[in-house]
C-alpha cells in the first residue's frame, strides 16, 4: 500500500496506474502459484515413473524435434517396446498447446519414440483437447493412474 498526493487533473491517471499495478501483482502471484503447483505435479510424475521403471527412466529430457528445435519432456523411459517420452499436461490451454507442438514435432522424427501425455487433471481437461493430444501421442493417461497403466504405455 502507498499514498500519493496528486493534482485533481491527475487523479484519473493515478487511479489507472494503481489499478494496473494491482492487476499485474495479481497476475504475477497467480503465475507463481501455477508454477509451484506444476513443480509438485512433475515431482509426482517422476516418483511414479521411477517406481514403475526402476533405473530405466531419465527426467527432464531435451530432444530435438523434426524442426531441429530442442523440446523438453518430463521423462524418457526405456520401455519394453522401445523408448517412450512422457510429458505432464495441465488443463490450461498454454500447457495443452505446448504439449501438442512438442509431441507433433517429435512424432515426425524417423525413429520417433512412443509419446505419452500425462493429464494432471483429467476431469478438468476439455475432451476436445484430449482428442487433439491423441493425434500426436501414442497414449494419454491420467497422473493418478496406477503403475500397470504406466507400464502399458511403455
Image (tube, rainbow, N blue to C red):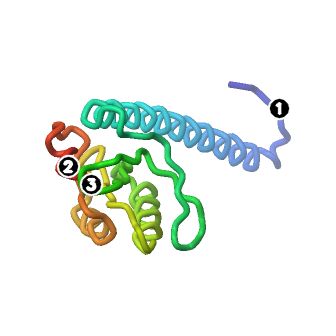
Residue positioned 43% across, 74% down in the render:
110
Q: Between disc 1 and disc 2, whose residue precedes?
A: 1
Mark nearer the viewer, 1 or 2: 2
Q: Nearer the viewer, residue 22 or 30?
A: 30
Residue positioned 69% across, 40% down in the render:
18
Q: Secondary structure at mark 2?
A: helix
Q: Nearer the viewer, residue 112 or 116?
A: 112
Query: Residue 5 has which mark?
Result: 1
Q: Which residue position is annotated with label 3?
A: 125
In the image, taking residue 20 as reference, residue 148 lies left or right, namely left
In the image, taking residue 128 as reference, residue 32 lies left or right, namely right
Q: Secondary structure at mark 3?
A: loop
Q: Are marks 2 and 3 in contact (CB under 8 Å)?
A: yes
Q: Between disc 1 and disc 3, whose residue precedes?
A: 1
Query: Residue 123 has which mark?
Result: 2
Neighbor class of circle 3 (other Cα within 10 Å; few <14, some 14-19, many 20+) is some
Q: How many angstroms separate mark 2 from mark 3 (CA)? A: 6 Å
Mark nearer the viewer, 1 or 3: 3
Quarter of the rendering containing residue 93: bottom left
Q: Secondary structure at mark 1?
A: loop
Query: From this viewpoint, which residue is outermost toward the right?
Result: 7
Q: Quadrant of the N terminus?
A: top right
Neighbor class of circle 1 (other Cα within 10 Å; few <14, some 14-19, many 20+) is few
Residue positioned 25% across, 60% down in the render:
126
Point out residue 119 in the picture as x, y percentages from the top left corner: 28, 49
In the image, taking residue 41 as reference, residue 151 lies left or right, namely left
Residue positioned 35% across, 46% down in the render:
77
Amino acid at each position: 500500500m502507498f499514498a500519493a498526493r496528486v493534482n485533481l487533473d491527475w487523479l484519473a491517471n493515478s487511479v489507472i496506474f494503481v489499478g494496473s499495478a494491482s492487476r499485474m501483482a495479481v497476475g504475477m502471484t497467480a503465475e507463481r502459484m501455477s508454477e509451484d503447483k506444476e513443480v509438485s505435479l512433475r515431482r509426482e510424475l517422476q516418483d511414479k515413473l521411477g517406481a514403475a521403471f526402476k533405473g530405466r527412466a531419465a527426467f527432464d529430457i531435451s530432444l530435438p524435434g523434426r524442426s531441429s528445435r530442442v523440446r523438453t519432456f518430463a521423462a524418457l523411459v526405456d520401455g519394453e517396446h522401445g523408448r517412450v517420452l512422457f510429458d505432464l499436461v495441465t488443463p490450461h490451454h498454454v500447457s495443452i498447446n505446448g504439449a501438442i507442438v512438442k509431441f507433433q514435432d517429435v512424432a515426425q522424427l524417423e525413429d520417433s519414440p512412443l509419446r505419452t501425455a500425462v493429464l494432471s487433471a483429467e476431469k478438468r481437461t476439455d475432451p476436445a483437447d484430449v482428442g487433439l493430444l491423441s493425434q500426436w501421442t501414442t497414449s494419454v493417461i491420467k497422473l493418478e493412474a496406477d503403475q500397470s497403466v504406466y507400464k502399458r504405455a511403455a
